[in-house]
Image: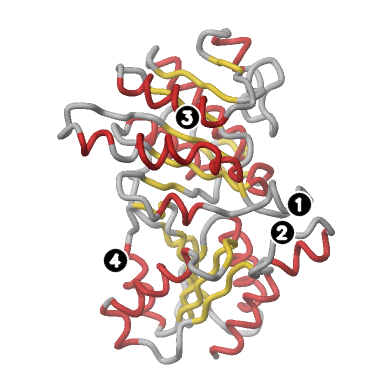
Amino acid sequence: MREITYSEAVREAMSEAMRENEDVFLMGEDIGIYGGAFGVSRGMYEEFGEERVRSTPIAESVIAGASVGAAMTGMRPIFEIQFSDFITIALDQIVNQAAKIRYMYGGKAKIPLVMRTPGGSGTGAAAQHSQSLENWTAHIPGLKVIQPATAYDAKGLLHAAIEDDNPVMFYEHKLCYRTSCDVPEGKYTIPIGVADVKREGADISVVATGIMVHKALEAADILAEEGIDIEVVDPRTLVPLDKETIVASVMKTGKAVVVTEAVKRSGFSAELASVIAEGESFDFLDAPIVRLAGKEIPMPYHPELEKKAVPQVEDIVEACRGLM
């Protein structure tokens, strides 16, 4: 086993899939010679050529629409939206076409496409390039939504997404690109819809998504020195959501903190909290569920204000101390 970064794991999964299946191709802005805004597709243009690594104009609706058409005719496109904020421009193609066509055609048409997109704050990209909008697509029946936190999960889940016959939204947090962990060489898949307990614990269940998984693990290390034993649960996929793992964790610990970067109002943190409140875990709760999420403001540019806008390690630590 070797250690590679999250961005390398994503590139490896795409390259392995493209070598294995000629129907898989990549399309997006600056993904060719430039290698993508975050360098994720670096070197792929040289290996696969311009027919299979297609740099597009700055036209997200066109990229999404072309991908839907290609998927309907038997291809397996991976299309990259350079920043997840700009799914807004492609929502008609994603929400009204990709998500609906298989159902409307009675299963006779398949839509095997993957939309990869970096999201989230922490890079000083300001209000229009730092949002966490995964809850928008999680709301739409017909879309699968994946949000891996680690390089290992990113590679295995991306392989599973590419092989799926349904449209899959694949959110990559920009700060996760630099993280690294042990990742096997060669192809492997992780089932879509299976959560992962990143750390076993007995006192409090922290259910976190995306970059917040890393912050929750940091908080757990700090709290361990105080004798507080934190369990960290990473759903990994928002749709379908592994409710059973979340409920089982809270039944064990009796306390729950939910942490997401997306804005708290109508955010996915509410969905996670409702799973705990509506499940068998409710009768095991010893305290109210705590939700930590983004402030209801556009993302500030200033780095210190940016940190204040989303949960940080110290916020998770304080929330857990309060529950104890």
Above or below — where is 25 with respect to 289?
above
* Lateral position of residue 131 relative to residue 127, left or right: left
| Residue that mark 2 sits on | 299
- Say which amino acid is labelled 4: Glu
Q: Earlier in the sequence, mark 4 or mark 1?
A: 1
Indicate the secondary structure of the residue bearing disc 4.
Answer: helix
Q: Residues within 10 Å of mark 2 (few under 14, many from 20)?
A: many
Which mark is on residue 126? 1
Above or below — where is 178 with respect to 164?
below
Query: Where's residue 293, x and y in %?
Result: 58, 69
Write the residue at 39% across / 55% down: 139
Query: Where's residue 113, x and y in %?
Result: 39, 30
Asked if the residues shown at circle 2 and circle 1 are in contact, with their CB atoms under 8 angstroms apart, the answer is yes
Distance between the alpha carbons at the discs numbered 2 and 3: 26 Å
| Residue that mark 3 sits on | 64
- Say which amino acid is labelled 1: Ala
Write the residue at 77% across / 60% down: 300
Q: Earlier in the sequence, mark 4 or mark 3?
A: 3
Indicate the secondary structure of the residue bearing disc 1.
Answer: loop
* Mark 4 or 3: the one toward you: 3
